[in-house]
Image (cartoon, helix red, strand yellow):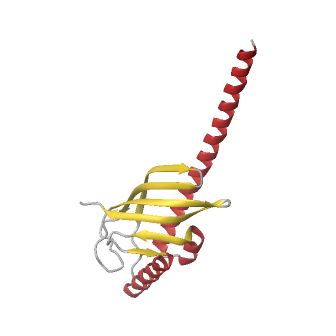
Amino acid sequence: MKIYFISILLLSTATCSQAQTDSKNNADEMAIRKIEELGRIAMETQDTLAMYKLVSPDYVVMNPNLKVHGFRGLIDLLTMWKQRNAAMNVTPPHIEHVIDKITINKDIAIVMGQDVPDAGATNPDGKPMSKRAYSNIYRRYLDSWQLIARQNSNICQ
């Protein structure tokens, strides 16, 4: 009888613990999805101030041209893109951000997905934009998440 009660106690404790973990993971996933959308909007509008909130100063990216740069390179790219669009009197292209998978492990979140630009969209250098696969890596800082790394590559058409 004693073993039965101990078994029930352990099972209920494990169930409660799993429910709390699932609830936390759901809240974290929703926070990551929100940041992903805010980041997409900031890129589309070349909002460098938003990037200071969403992206870690330690950020590193490998772009489809196989160039690696940090946070300063991101801000420079957005500034160049904004100046080019203003000079050409064009609006930035819309890019659909498709999340395929979010994996959260303690204070690290990995997002894998695709960036799908509108037809006719171009990069800041004027070349046609292609569909890209990406991986974004976030780290939790206190109560918020920041993007610390990104890798993206063109998908062959």
Residue 117 appears anywhere in the view: no
Which corner quadrant holds the N terminus?
Answer: top right
Q: Residue 63 appears at what percent x and percent y? A: 37, 70
Q: Residue at x 34, y 65 (%)?
A: 118
Viewed as shown, does residue 2 lie left or right of 43?
A: right
The picture quadrant where one finds residue 108 is bottom right
Q: Residue 74 appears at what percent x and percent y? A: 46, 76
**Tally of numbered discs:** 0
Which is more toward the observer, 133 or 60? Answer: 60
Which is more toward the observer, 73 or 114? Answer: 73
Which is more toward the observer, 129 or 65? Answer: 65
Residue closest to the far bottom: 87
Q: Residue at x 38, y 64 (%)?
A: 152
Viewed as shown, does residue 46 lie left or right of 153?
A: right
Which corner quadrant holds the C terminus?
Answer: bottom left
The picture quadrant where one finds residue 58 is bottom right
Q: Residue 93 appears at what percent x and percent y? A: 39, 71
Q: Residue 134 appears at what percent x and percent y? A: 40, 60
Residue closest to the far left: 157
Residue closest to the far top: 1
Residue 60 appears anywhere in the view: yes
The picture quadrant where one finds residue 129 is bottom left
Q: Residue at x 53, y 77 (%)?
A: 48
Q: Residue at x 41, y 60 (%)?
A: 96
